[in-house]
Amino acid sequence: MSYMASHRTARRKAALVRAFSDIGLFSRAVLRRPLRPYQLGPARAIAASVLGGHGRTFAVMMARQAGKNETAAQLEAFLLNLQRRSGGFIVKAAPTFRPQALNSLLRLQAVLADAPLPPLEREGDQMLRCGRARIAFYSAAPGANVVGATADILLEADEAQDIDPEKWHKDFAPMGASTNVTTVLWGTAWTADTLLARTILALREQEACDGQQRVFRVPWQTVAESVPAYGRYVTTQISRLGLQHPLIRTQYLLQEIDDAAGMFPPTTQALMRGAHPRQQGPTEGRAYALLIDVAGEALAPGSLAAERRRDSTAATVVEIAASPYETSGRGLPRYLVMERYLWTGTPQHELAGALAHLADLWGARHVVIDATGVGAGLASNLKHMLGARLIPFVFTAQSKSQLGWEFLGLCSSGRFLDHRSDDSPAQQRFWREVAAARYELGDGPNQQMRWGVPDPAIHDDLLISAALCAALPQTAVPPTESHIIESEDAL
Protein backbone atom coordinates (compact mmCIF):
# COMPACT_ATOMS: atom_id res chain seq x y z
CA MET A 1 0.00 0.00 0.00
CA SER A 2 1.36 3.44 -0.93
CA TYR A 3 2.04 6.08 1.68
CA MET A 4 -0.87 8.22 0.43
CA ALA A 5 -3.33 5.31 0.52
CA SER A 6 -2.13 4.33 3.97
CA HIS A 7 -2.51 7.92 5.14
CA ARG A 8 -6.09 8.12 3.78
CA THR A 9 -6.97 4.84 5.52
CA ALA A 10 -5.53 6.12 8.80
CA ARG A 11 -7.51 9.32 8.50
CA ARG A 12 -10.76 7.40 7.85
CA LYS A 13 -10.12 5.25 10.92
CA ALA A 14 -9.40 8.32 13.02
CA ALA A 15 -12.61 9.93 11.79
CA LEU A 16 -14.59 6.81 12.76
CA VAL A 17 -13.00 6.84 16.22
CA ARG A 18 -14.02 10.47 16.67
CA ALA A 19 -17.53 9.72 15.37
CA PHE A 20 -18.00 7.02 17.99
CA SER A 21 -17.28 9.55 20.72
CA ASP A 22 -20.43 11.59 20.04
CA ILE A 23 -23.80 10.59 18.66
CA GLY A 24 -24.02 13.81 16.66
CA LEU A 25 -20.83 12.95 14.76
CA PHE A 26 -21.95 9.33 14.45
CA SER A 27 -25.28 10.44 12.97
CA ARG A 28 -23.65 12.73 10.43
CA ALA A 29 -20.41 10.91 9.50
CA VAL A 30 -21.32 7.23 9.88
CA LEU A 31 -25.06 6.92 9.39
CA ARG A 32 -25.19 9.90 6.99
CA ARG A 33 -28.60 10.79 8.49
CA PRO A 34 -27.92 13.94 10.54
CA LEU A 35 -30.17 14.42 13.53
CA ARG A 36 -31.86 17.79 13.93
CA PRO A 37 -31.03 20.04 16.90
CA TYR A 38 -34.17 19.10 18.84
CA GLN A 39 -33.31 15.40 18.37
CA LEU A 40 -29.68 15.77 19.42
CA GLY A 41 -30.50 17.19 22.85
CA PRO A 42 -32.21 14.10 24.27
CA ALA A 43 -29.99 11.69 22.30
CA ARG A 44 -26.80 13.17 23.78
CA ALA A 45 -28.23 13.25 27.31
CA ILE A 46 -29.30 9.59 27.15
CA ALA A 47 -25.98 8.49 25.62
CA ALA A 48 -24.03 10.38 28.33
CA SER A 49 -26.01 8.59 31.04
CA VAL A 50 -25.29 5.20 29.45
CA LEU A 51 -21.57 5.84 28.90
CA GLY A 52 -21.13 7.41 32.33
CA GLY A 53 -23.03 4.65 34.11
CA HIS A 54 -25.39 7.18 35.70
CA GLY A 55 -28.53 5.03 35.32
CA ARG A 56 -30.85 8.00 34.85
CA THR A 57 -34.43 7.76 33.62
CA PHE A 58 -35.56 10.05 30.79
CA ALA A 59 -38.89 10.96 29.19
CA VAL A 60 -38.85 12.18 25.59
CA MET A 61 -42.13 13.63 24.37
CA MET A 62 -42.16 14.71 20.73
CA ALA A 63 -44.95 16.00 18.53
CA ARG A 64 -46.39 13.53 16.07
CA GLN A 65 -44.21 12.87 13.00
CA ALA A 66 -41.33 14.89 14.49
CA GLY A 67 -38.77 12.08 14.23
CA LYS A 68 -39.03 10.39 17.63
CA ASN A 69 -38.57 6.91 16.16
CA GLU A 70 -35.60 8.03 14.05
CA THR A 71 -33.94 9.49 17.16
CA ALA A 72 -34.46 6.23 19.07
CA ALA A 73 -33.15 4.08 16.20
CA GLN A 74 -29.99 6.17 15.79
CA LEU A 75 -29.34 6.10 19.53
CA GLU A 76 -29.71 2.30 19.50
CA ALA A 77 -27.36 1.98 16.53
CA PHE A 78 -24.77 4.17 18.28
CA LEU A 79 -24.87 2.20 21.54
CA LEU A 80 -24.90 -1.23 19.92
CA ASN A 81 -21.81 -0.45 17.88
CA LEU A 82 -20.04 1.00 20.92
CA GLN A 83 -20.75 -2.23 22.78
CA ARG A 84 -19.97 -4.50 19.83
CA ARG A 85 -16.95 -6.07 21.58
CA SER A 86 -17.87 -5.83 25.24
CA GLY A 87 -21.48 -7.01 24.72
CA GLY A 88 -24.69 -6.23 26.55
CA PHE A 89 -28.45 -5.93 26.06
CA ILE A 90 -30.89 -3.24 25.04
CA VAL A 91 -34.52 -4.10 25.82
CA LYS A 92 -37.29 -2.18 24.05
CA ALA A 93 -41.00 -2.52 24.84
CA ALA A 94 -43.94 -1.29 22.76
CA PRO A 95 -47.72 -1.48 23.29
CA THR A 96 -47.93 -4.25 20.66
CA PHE A 97 -45.37 -6.43 18.90
CA ARG A 98 -47.10 -6.14 15.53
CA PRO A 99 -46.87 -3.54 14.23
CA GLN A 100 -45.16 -1.28 16.79
CA ALA A 101 -42.21 -3.29 18.16
CA LEU A 102 -41.62 -4.89 14.75
CA ASN A 103 -41.58 -1.45 13.11
CA SER A 104 -38.88 -0.36 15.57
CA LEU A 105 -36.80 -3.40 14.66
CA LEU A 106 -37.13 -2.71 10.93
CA ARG A 107 -36.33 0.99 11.39
CA LEU A 108 -33.11 0.14 13.25
CA GLN A 109 -32.06 -2.13 10.38
CA ALA A 110 -32.88 0.64 7.87
CA VAL A 111 -30.85 3.23 9.79
CA LEU A 112 -27.74 1.05 9.43
CA ALA A 113 -28.42 -0.12 5.89
CA ASP A 114 -26.13 2.40 4.16
CA ALA A 115 -23.57 2.81 6.95
CA PRO A 116 -19.94 1.53 6.55
CA LEU A 117 -20.55 -0.97 9.35
CA PRO A 118 -21.26 -4.69 9.44
CA PRO A 119 -25.04 -5.29 9.18
CA LEU A 120 -27.06 -6.38 12.18
CA GLU A 121 -27.83 -10.09 12.36
CA ARG A 122 -31.38 -11.21 13.01
CA GLU A 123 -31.88 -13.73 15.83
CA GLY A 124 -35.41 -15.08 15.83
CA ASP A 125 -38.44 -12.83 15.51
CA GLN A 126 -37.57 -10.21 18.07
CA MET A 127 -33.81 -9.79 18.41
CA LEU A 128 -30.93 -8.18 16.50
CA ARG A 129 -27.23 -8.80 17.19
CA CYS A 130 -24.29 -6.43 16.70
CA GLY A 131 -21.17 -8.41 17.54
CA ARG A 132 -21.67 -9.39 21.19
CA ALA A 133 -24.31 -6.70 21.80
CA ARG A 134 -28.00 -7.38 21.30
CA ILE A 135 -31.32 -5.58 21.26
CA ALA A 136 -34.60 -7.37 22.02
CA PHE A 137 -38.05 -6.06 21.12
CA TYR A 138 -41.05 -7.06 23.25
CA SER A 139 -44.78 -6.48 23.37
CA ALA A 140 -46.01 -4.76 26.52
CA ALA A 141 -49.65 -5.70 25.89
CA PRO A 142 -51.33 -6.72 29.17
CA GLY A 143 -51.57 -10.37 28.13
CA ALA A 144 -48.13 -10.66 26.54
CA ASN A 145 -45.82 -13.36 27.92
CA VAL A 146 -42.55 -11.54 28.47
CA VAL A 147 -39.47 -13.73 28.79
CA GLY A 148 -37.16 -12.52 31.56
CA ALA A 149 -34.13 -10.60 30.29
CA THR A 150 -31.51 -8.29 31.71
CA ALA A 151 -31.06 -4.84 30.22
CA ASP A 152 -27.58 -3.51 30.94
CA ILE A 153 -27.11 -1.00 28.09
CA LEU A 154 -30.54 0.63 27.81
CA LEU A 155 -34.18 -0.04 28.71
CA GLU A 156 -36.79 1.63 26.49
CA ALA A 157 -40.56 2.05 26.34
CA ASP A 158 -41.90 3.17 22.97
CA GLU A 159 -45.27 4.95 22.86
CA ALA A 160 -45.15 4.84 26.64
CA GLN A 161 -48.47 6.69 26.95
CA ASP A 162 -50.15 3.52 25.68
CA ILE A 163 -48.33 1.01 27.93
CA ASP A 164 -50.12 -0.22 31.04
CA PRO A 165 -48.15 1.11 34.07
CA GLU A 166 -48.71 -2.13 36.01
CA LYS A 167 -47.33 -4.20 33.11
CA TRP A 168 -44.27 -1.98 32.86
CA HIS A 169 -43.44 -2.04 36.55
CA LYS A 170 -44.09 -5.77 36.91
CA ASP A 171 -42.37 -7.15 33.79
CA PHE A 172 -39.98 -4.53 32.41
CA ALA A 173 -38.63 -2.22 35.12
CA PRO A 174 -37.07 -5.19 36.99
CA MET A 175 -35.00 -6.02 33.88
CA GLY A 176 -32.68 -3.12 34.69
CA ALA A 177 -32.82 -3.16 38.50
CA SER A 178 -29.57 -5.09 39.04
CA THR A 179 -27.59 -3.14 36.40
CA ASN A 180 -28.59 0.45 37.21
CA VAL A 181 -29.59 0.70 33.57
CA THR A 182 -30.42 3.98 31.85
CA THR A 183 -34.13 4.04 31.01
CA VAL A 184 -35.98 6.13 28.45
CA LEU A 185 -39.70 6.46 27.84
CA TRP A 186 -40.62 7.75 24.38
CA GLY A 187 -44.07 9.02 23.48
CA THR A 188 -46.51 11.87 23.23
CA ALA A 189 -49.09 13.42 25.54
CA TRP A 190 -52.38 11.74 26.34
CA THR A 191 -53.99 11.69 29.78
CA ALA A 192 -52.59 12.39 33.24
CA ASP A 193 -52.73 8.78 34.41
CA THR A 194 -50.56 7.23 31.67
CA LEU A 195 -47.17 5.66 32.35
CA LEU A 196 -45.47 8.52 30.51
CA ALA A 197 -47.34 11.27 32.40
CA ARG A 198 -46.66 9.67 35.79
CA THR A 199 -42.99 9.25 34.95
CA ILE A 200 -42.67 12.88 33.85
CA LEU A 201 -44.21 14.02 37.14
CA ALA A 202 -41.58 12.06 39.10
CA LEU A 203 -38.74 13.22 36.86
CA ARG A 204 -39.69 16.87 37.30
CA GLU A 205 -39.14 16.45 41.04
CA GLN A 206 -35.69 14.94 40.40
CA GLU A 207 -34.82 17.78 38.03
CA ALA A 208 -35.74 20.31 40.70
CA CYS A 209 -33.37 18.59 43.14
CA ASP A 210 -30.20 18.20 41.03
CA GLY A 211 -30.72 20.44 37.99
CA GLN A 212 -30.13 17.58 35.52
CA GLN A 213 -32.58 17.64 32.61
CA ARG A 214 -34.50 14.39 32.30
CA VAL A 215 -37.67 15.49 30.50
CA PHE A 216 -37.45 16.61 26.87
CA ARG A 217 -40.59 18.12 25.31
CA VAL A 218 -40.61 18.95 21.60
CA PRO A 219 -43.93 20.58 20.55
CA TRP A 220 -44.70 21.19 16.90
CA GLN A 221 -43.47 24.80 16.93
CA THR A 222 -39.94 23.60 17.79
CA VAL A 223 -40.00 21.11 14.92
CA ALA A 224 -41.27 23.79 12.52
CA GLU A 225 -38.19 25.92 13.23
CA SER A 226 -36.05 23.18 11.64
CA VAL A 227 -38.62 21.89 9.12
CA PRO A 228 -40.81 24.70 7.68
CA ALA A 229 -42.84 22.20 5.62
CA TYR A 230 -43.82 20.44 8.85
CA GLY A 231 -45.03 23.76 10.24
CA ARG A 232 -47.22 24.31 7.20
CA TYR A 233 -48.67 20.80 7.57
CA VAL A 234 -49.54 21.26 11.25
CA THR A 235 -51.02 24.69 10.60
CA THR A 236 -53.35 23.06 8.07
CA GLN A 237 -54.37 20.42 10.61
CA ILE A 238 -55.09 23.09 13.22
CA SER A 239 -57.23 24.97 10.69
CA ARG A 240 -59.15 21.75 9.99
CA LEU A 241 -59.60 20.55 13.59
CA GLY A 242 -59.16 23.65 15.77
CA LEU A 243 -56.73 24.32 18.63
CA GLN A 244 -59.05 22.76 21.23
CA HIS A 245 -59.35 19.40 19.49
CA PRO A 246 -57.94 16.65 21.74
CA LEU A 247 -55.64 15.31 19.02
CA ILE A 248 -54.17 18.76 18.35
CA ARG A 249 -53.68 19.39 22.05
CA THR A 250 -52.06 16.01 22.75
CA GLN A 251 -50.14 15.11 19.61
CA TYR A 252 -48.91 18.52 18.52
CA LEU A 253 -49.11 20.86 21.53
CA LEU A 254 -48.18 18.05 23.97
CA GLN A 255 -50.89 18.97 26.48
CA GLU A 256 -52.53 16.37 28.69
CA ILE A 257 -56.30 16.06 28.64
CA ASP A 258 -58.86 14.59 31.02
CA ASP A 259 -59.78 11.00 30.19
CA ALA A 260 -63.38 11.51 31.32
CA ALA A 261 -64.63 15.03 30.83
CA GLY A 262 -67.13 17.33 29.21
CA MET A 263 -66.95 16.76 25.48
CA PHE A 264 -67.68 20.37 24.53
CA PRO A 265 -65.94 22.87 26.82
CA PRO A 266 -67.13 26.50 26.80
CA THR A 267 -64.52 27.55 24.22
CA THR A 268 -65.77 24.89 21.81
CA GLN A 269 -69.43 25.73 22.46
CA ALA A 270 -68.71 29.37 21.61
CA LEU A 271 -67.28 28.28 18.27
CA MET A 272 -70.47 26.30 17.56
CA ARG A 273 -72.79 29.32 17.83
CA GLY A 274 -73.56 30.99 14.52
CA ALA A 275 -75.17 34.28 13.61
CA HIS A 276 -77.37 33.09 10.74
CA PRO A 277 -81.16 32.85 11.17
CA ARG A 278 -83.13 29.66 11.46
CA GLN A 279 -84.98 28.75 8.25
CA GLN A 280 -88.02 26.59 7.63
CA GLY A 281 -87.34 26.11 3.95
CA PRO A 282 -84.48 26.21 1.46
CA THR A 283 -82.93 29.18 -0.31
CA GLU A 284 -82.46 28.74 -4.03
CA GLY A 285 -78.92 28.02 -5.12
CA ARG A 286 -77.70 26.62 -1.81
CA ALA A 287 -76.83 23.01 -0.91
CA TYR A 288 -78.42 21.13 1.99
CA ALA A 289 -78.09 17.81 3.81
CA LEU A 290 -80.49 15.94 6.09
CA LEU A 291 -79.00 14.11 9.10
CA ILE A 292 -81.16 11.49 10.85
CA ASP A 293 -80.68 9.71 14.18
CA VAL A 294 -83.22 6.89 14.51
CA ALA A 295 -84.87 6.16 17.86
CA GLY A 296 -83.67 2.99 19.56
CA GLU A 297 -85.68 0.00 20.70
CA ALA A 298 -88.79 0.95 22.67
CA LEU A 299 -88.79 0.17 26.40
CA ALA A 300 -91.65 -1.43 28.28
CA PRO A 301 -94.61 1.00 28.25
CA GLY A 302 -95.37 2.60 31.60
CA SER A 303 -92.00 1.80 33.15
CA LEU A 304 -89.99 4.56 34.85
CA ALA A 305 -87.10 3.89 32.48
CA ALA A 306 -89.42 4.33 29.51
CA GLU A 307 -90.57 7.70 30.80
CA ARG A 308 -87.04 8.91 31.51
CA ARG A 309 -85.36 7.54 28.39
CA ARG A 310 -87.87 7.59 25.58
CA ASP A 311 -85.72 8.13 22.51
CA SER A 312 -86.91 10.21 19.58
CA THR A 313 -85.99 10.12 15.94
CA ALA A 314 -84.20 13.38 15.29
CA ALA A 315 -83.41 15.09 12.00
CA THR A 316 -81.14 18.09 11.49
CA VAL A 317 -81.02 20.10 8.27
CA VAL A 318 -77.68 21.75 7.52
CA GLU A 319 -76.59 24.02 4.72
CA ILE A 320 -73.29 22.95 3.14
CA ALA A 321 -71.50 26.27 2.73
CA ALA A 322 -68.08 27.61 1.88
CA SER A 323 -66.18 29.63 4.45
CA PRO A 324 -66.80 33.37 4.02
CA TYR A 325 -63.04 33.82 4.27
CA GLU A 326 -62.28 31.37 1.44
CA THR A 327 -61.94 32.81 -2.07
CA SER A 328 -60.08 30.05 -3.88
CA GLY A 329 -62.91 27.50 -3.83
CA ARG A 330 -60.60 24.88 -2.28
CA GLY A 331 -61.78 25.32 1.32
CA LEU A 332 -63.44 22.59 3.38
CA PRO A 333 -67.20 23.04 3.90
CA ARG A 334 -69.00 24.51 6.86
CA TYR A 335 -72.27 23.04 8.14
CA LEU A 336 -74.88 25.60 9.14
CA VAL A 337 -77.90 24.32 11.08
CA MET A 338 -81.12 25.48 9.43
CA GLU A 339 -83.86 23.46 11.13
CA ARG A 340 -84.49 20.50 13.46
CA TYR A 341 -87.31 17.94 13.61
CA LEU A 342 -88.28 15.37 16.27
CA TRP A 343 -90.65 12.37 16.23
CA THR A 344 -91.43 10.31 19.33
CA GLY A 345 -93.30 7.02 19.04
CA THR A 346 -94.01 7.47 15.33
CA PRO A 347 -94.35 4.20 13.31
CA GLN A 348 -91.52 3.60 10.86
CA HIS A 349 -93.73 3.58 7.77
CA GLU A 350 -94.91 7.09 8.67
CA LEU A 351 -91.34 8.18 9.41
CA ALA A 352 -90.15 6.99 6.01
CA GLY A 353 -92.72 9.13 4.24
CA ALA A 354 -92.04 12.19 6.41
CA LEU A 355 -88.26 11.95 5.97
CA ALA A 356 -88.51 11.46 2.22
CA HIS A 357 -90.77 14.53 2.05
CA LEU A 358 -88.24 16.60 4.02
CA ALA A 359 -85.42 15.45 1.77
CA ASP A 360 -87.38 16.64 -1.25
CA LEU A 361 -88.59 19.84 0.44
CA TRP A 362 -85.02 20.93 1.18
CA GLY A 363 -83.61 19.48 -2.03
CA ALA A 364 -81.12 17.59 0.17
CA ARG A 365 -77.99 16.69 -1.74
CA HIS A 366 -77.14 14.03 0.87
CA VAL A 367 -79.22 12.23 3.51
CA VAL A 368 -77.19 10.54 6.27
CA ILE A 369 -79.17 8.08 8.40
CA ASP A 370 -78.35 5.95 11.42
CA ALA A 371 -78.73 2.46 9.95
CA THR A 372 -77.98 0.60 13.20
CA GLY A 373 -80.46 -1.92 14.61
CA VAL A 374 -84.04 -0.77 13.98
CA GLY A 375 -82.64 1.99 11.78
CA ALA A 376 -81.59 -0.57 9.19
CA GLY A 377 -85.18 -1.13 8.09
CA LEU A 378 -85.93 2.57 7.84
CA ALA A 379 -82.71 3.12 5.90
CA SER A 380 -83.68 0.33 3.50
CA ASN A 381 -87.08 1.91 2.86
CA LEU A 382 -85.54 5.34 2.28
CA LYS A 383 -82.95 3.87 -0.08
CA HIS A 384 -85.78 2.91 -2.45
CA MET A 385 -87.16 6.44 -2.28
CA LEU A 386 -83.97 8.52 -2.32
CA GLY A 387 -81.48 6.35 -4.19
CA ALA A 388 -77.82 7.45 -4.20
CA ARG A 389 -78.55 10.48 -2.02
CA LEU A 390 -78.88 8.20 1.02
CA ILE A 391 -75.73 7.53 3.10
CA PRO A 392 -76.32 4.77 5.73
CA PHE A 393 -74.15 5.02 8.86
CA VAL A 394 -73.82 1.96 11.10
CA PHE A 395 -72.73 2.66 14.66
CA THR A 396 -70.03 0.43 16.12
CA ALA A 397 -67.54 1.26 18.89
CA GLN A 398 -64.97 2.12 16.24
CA SER A 399 -67.24 4.07 13.88
CA LYS A 400 -68.79 6.09 16.71
CA SER A 401 -65.32 6.92 18.04
CA GLN A 402 -64.22 8.12 14.61
CA LEU A 403 -67.44 10.13 14.19
CA GLY A 404 -66.86 11.74 17.58
CA TRP A 405 -63.27 12.73 16.75
CA GLU A 406 -64.34 14.17 13.38
CA PHE A 407 -67.33 16.06 14.81
CA LEU A 408 -65.15 17.55 17.54
CA GLY A 409 -62.83 18.72 14.78
CA LEU A 410 -65.71 20.43 12.96
CA CYS A 411 -66.89 22.12 16.16
CA SER A 412 -63.46 23.16 17.39
CA SER A 413 -62.58 24.74 14.05
CA GLY A 414 -65.84 26.68 13.64
CA ARG A 415 -67.09 24.47 10.80
CA PHE A 416 -70.30 23.41 12.58
CA LEU A 417 -72.53 26.39 13.38
CA ASP A 418 -75.96 26.42 14.96
CA HIS A 419 -78.44 29.10 13.90
CA ARG A 420 -78.76 32.18 16.12
CA SER A 421 -80.67 31.70 19.35
CA ASP A 422 -84.45 31.82 18.92
CA ASP A 423 -85.51 30.03 22.14
CA SER A 424 -87.15 27.22 20.18
CA PRO A 425 -87.65 24.01 22.23
CA ALA A 426 -85.56 21.93 19.80
CA GLN A 427 -82.61 24.33 19.99
CA GLN A 428 -82.78 24.50 23.79
CA ARG A 429 -82.84 20.71 23.94
CA PHE A 430 -79.83 20.47 21.60
CA TRP A 431 -77.72 22.74 23.82
CA ARG A 432 -78.74 20.82 26.94
CA GLU A 433 -77.45 17.68 25.22
CA VAL A 434 -74.22 19.45 24.25
CA ALA A 435 -73.63 20.61 27.83
CA ALA A 436 -74.34 17.12 29.21
CA ALA A 437 -72.18 15.22 26.70
CA ARG A 438 -69.17 13.37 28.14
CA TYR A 439 -66.37 11.32 26.67
CA GLU A 440 -63.99 8.66 27.91
CA LEU A 441 -60.74 7.63 26.27
CA GLY A 442 -59.99 3.95 25.84
CA ASP A 443 -56.68 2.29 26.64
CA GLY A 444 -54.20 1.29 23.98
CA PRO A 445 -52.82 2.72 20.76
CA ASN A 446 -56.16 3.09 18.94
CA GLN A 447 -57.26 6.00 21.14
CA GLN A 448 -60.92 5.09 20.87
CA MET A 449 -63.37 7.53 22.37
CA ARG A 450 -66.63 6.55 24.02
CA TRP A 451 -68.99 9.50 24.04
CA GLY A 452 -72.59 10.51 24.52
CA VAL A 453 -74.96 11.79 27.20
CA PRO A 454 -74.86 9.56 30.29
CA ASP A 455 -77.77 11.32 32.03
CA PRO A 456 -80.88 9.25 31.08
CA ALA A 457 -83.15 12.25 31.61
CA ILE A 458 -81.54 14.34 28.90
CA HIS A 459 -81.15 12.09 25.79
CA ASP A 460 -78.68 12.69 22.97
CA ASP A 461 -80.87 12.35 19.86
CA LEU A 462 -80.31 15.85 18.47
CA LEU A 463 -76.59 15.73 19.30
CA ILE A 464 -76.11 12.43 17.46
CA SER A 465 -78.14 13.76 14.54
CA ALA A 466 -75.91 16.84 14.32
CA ALA A 467 -72.73 14.76 14.62
CA LEU A 468 -73.68 12.83 11.49
CA CYS A 469 -72.54 15.86 9.47
CA ALA A 470 -69.05 14.42 10.03
CA ALA A 471 -70.11 11.46 7.86
CA LEU A 472 -70.83 13.73 4.89
CA PRO A 473 -68.33 13.76 2.00
CA GLN A 474 -65.60 16.24 2.98
CA THR A 475 -65.33 17.87 -0.43
CA ALA A 476 -64.69 21.52 -1.13
CA VAL A 477 -67.58 23.80 -2.00
CA PRO A 478 -67.30 26.89 -4.19
CA PRO A 479 -67.72 30.28 -2.51
CA THR A 480 -71.08 31.92 -3.09
CA GLU A 481 -72.64 35.26 -2.39
CA SER A 482 -74.51 33.74 0.52
CA HIS A 483 -74.72 35.42 3.88
CA ILE A 484 -71.52 35.86 5.84
CA ILE A 485 -71.43 33.47 8.79
CA GLU A 486 -69.50 34.38 11.90
CA SER A 487 -69.52 32.98 15.43
CA GLU A 488 -71.48 35.04 17.96
CA ASP A 489 -68.45 35.52 20.18
CA ALA A 490 -66.68 37.29 17.30
CA LEU A 491 -69.49 39.79 16.74
Image (cartoon, rainbow, N blue to C red):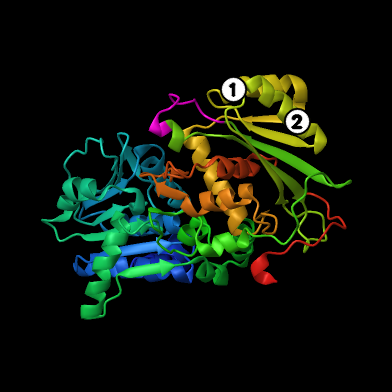
Question: Can you see residue 22?
Answer: no
Q: Which residue is mark 2?
A: 389
Give residue 274's mark. Answer: none
Name which residue lies at 76% across and 34% down: 358
Q: Give x and y (percent) for residue 141.
A: 29, 40
Point out the image quarter for the N terminus. Answer: bottom left
As measured in the structure, the alpha-carbon distance from the residue carrying label 1 to the one carrying label 2 is: 16 Å
Name which residue lies at 45% across and 25% down: 301
Point out the image quarter for the C terminus. Answer: bottom right
Report the amino acid beneath label 2.
Arg
Name which residue lies at 43% across and 58% down: 68
Q: Give x and y (percent) for residue 285.
A: 88, 46
Q: Is residue 223 left or right of residue 174?
A: right
Extreme residue toward the left, this view: 178
Q: Is residue 186 left or right of residue 131?
A: right
Counting the numbered discs, the total is: 2
Within the image, what quadrant is residue 350 found in? top right
Magenta span: helix, strand or loop, mainly? Answer: loop
* Mark whose residue sits in front, 1 or 2: 1
Assign a secondary structure to mark 1: helix
Report the amino acid beneath label 1.
Ala
Assign a secondary structure to mark 2: helix
Range of magenta residues = 295-305
Give residue 376's mark. Answer: 1
Q: Nearer the viewer, residue 423 or 414?
A: 423
